[in-house]
Image (cartoon, helix red, strand yellow):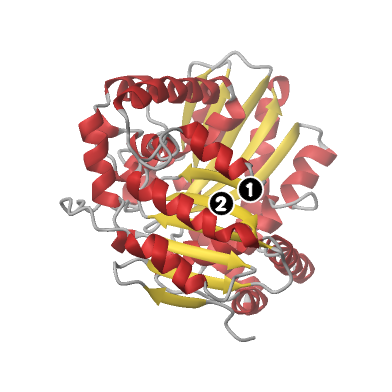
Amino acid sequence: MASPFKKTKLGNGITLVTVPMKETASATILVFYPVGSRHESPELAGGSHFVEHLMFKGTRRRPDTTHISRELDAVGSEYNAFTSKDHTGYYVKVASEHLPMAADMLADMLSESLFDATEMEREKGVIIEEIRMYEDNPMMQLDDVFEEALFPGSTLGRNIAGTVETMTAMKREDVIRYRDMFYRPGKATVIVAGKLPSNVMTLVKKTFGAIKDTKAPKAKPFAKFVVTPALGNGPEAKVKFKETEQVHLAVGYPAYGYGDKRLPALSMLAVILGGNMSSRLFIQVRERRGLCYYIRTSLARFEDVGAFMVSAGLKKDKLDEGVKSILEEIAKLRDRGVEAEELARAKEYLKGKTVLSLEETSEVADWYGRQQLFLGKMETPAEKMRKIDAVTAAEVLKVAKDVLRHGRLRLAVIGPFKDAARFDKLIK
């Protein structure tokens, strides 16, 4: 299968990736910057997320958020932004004839946003309410508690939105200085996917290609997380007290970062253990024992490390049985490996999900953009399919023994408990 993408370096340093898709009438333009919460100083905790919000608050040509939203809403576009631990993204998805407006809009927002002092103070209040919303919702907060336990002493364990205290104290000049260090053309990756006009290169050069460098000082590299032998001295539990009717917990381990050759086998492991409604955990913990409503596995990947996590909402009076059941299924997989039939099913599941997701121009843009951002190179869906097909049961077992080490296990719990000791005993 021929590579469907084209990569170009613009004169100002922006990396442009174009992905034409014939069987669609829409187009998505997505812009990635390699900056997230792990790059922040303690005083600027939440700064990356704050910058993301402020990019929608007005430019010189579009002086407030109403001008921006009305122009985007007028053509029925889908638009949003997101901040992660290590990257921030902005996108607009439109009917392809409106791509010139979308490109102009994003380029304007990302290079000419005003960061008006009054707007900044108002938006602090919005983000503080967002923080409180997460704190009120255990399912939404669970990842933060787990990653704090899994990545001790690292900015990877920090809440992306920061805290009420850091948001309240954040100064305009510090936020602008932080923005200018990272929002530079040489750091940006622009992806345009979908039904592309013949002049797409001219269009992007006219908008994004005209962005000038900020000339700010270079950002200091973040501290990489190292899985030291001390991390194997666990397992350990972390508890966050909250009066809930359901106990939300996460069990997990440090795993592999972007580009690791073992990721296809690890993805297979995640699917078989808890990736769908026919997975081992779903069948054993929910269907046969009725201990939970939701239970699932997930993988997080960063430049230097990753996270393998099982999350579940369990009955309070059956909590111990639920935790033991989860650990039993993990141990079985780690010790005995997988059957040929379930490995074959997992391969087809992953391939099918990939095919379905890549029918959307926004997903295609995300697919190529993340690869370029973190790896500097891209593989096509067909190339990924071949890697999935090549995974063997022996490779899955090897990865299971490497990742699912009991000494590295971390358990995060949100529920009506104040003492982690009972959970430490439960997982020893």
Looking at the picture, tell me which residue is in the foreground, 41 or 78: 78
Q: Position of residue 285 (x, y in %)?
A: 75, 39
Picture layout, residue 337 above or below residue 236? below
The quadrant where residue 363 appears: bottom right
Task: Please report contact status of discs 2 and 1: CB closer than 8 Å, yes or no.
Answer: yes
- Where's the N terminus, which quadrant? bottom right
> Does residue 124 appear in the picture of this structure?
yes
Is residue 244 found left or right of 421 in the rendered image? Answer: right
Q: Residue furthest right?
A: 288
Is residue 278 found left or right of 118 in the rendered image? Answer: right
Amino acid tagged 1 = Ser
Q: Residues under labels 2 and 1: Cα distance?
A: 7 Å
> Does residue 255 appear in the picture of this structure?
no
Q: Position of residue 344 (x, y in %)?
A: 76, 70
Q: Position of residue 247 (x, y in %)?
A: 64, 24
Residue 181 — which label?
none
Looking at the picture, tell me which residue is in the foreground, 208 or 308: 208
Q: Residues within 10 Å of mark 2 (few under 14, many from 20)?
A: many
Which residue has dot 1 on it? Answer: 77
Is residue 397 found left or right of 114 in the rendered image? Answer: right
Amino acid tagged 2 = Val
Please name the residue shown 35% across and 71% down the image. Answer: 10
Q: Residue furthest left?
A: 217
Please name the residue shown 41% across and 60% down the image. Answer: 207
Which residue has dot 2 on it? Answer: 92
Assign a secondary structure to mark 2: strand
Q: Which badge, 2 or 1, is on the more N-terminal residue?
A: 1
Please name the residue shown 53% across and 76% down the image. Answer: 379
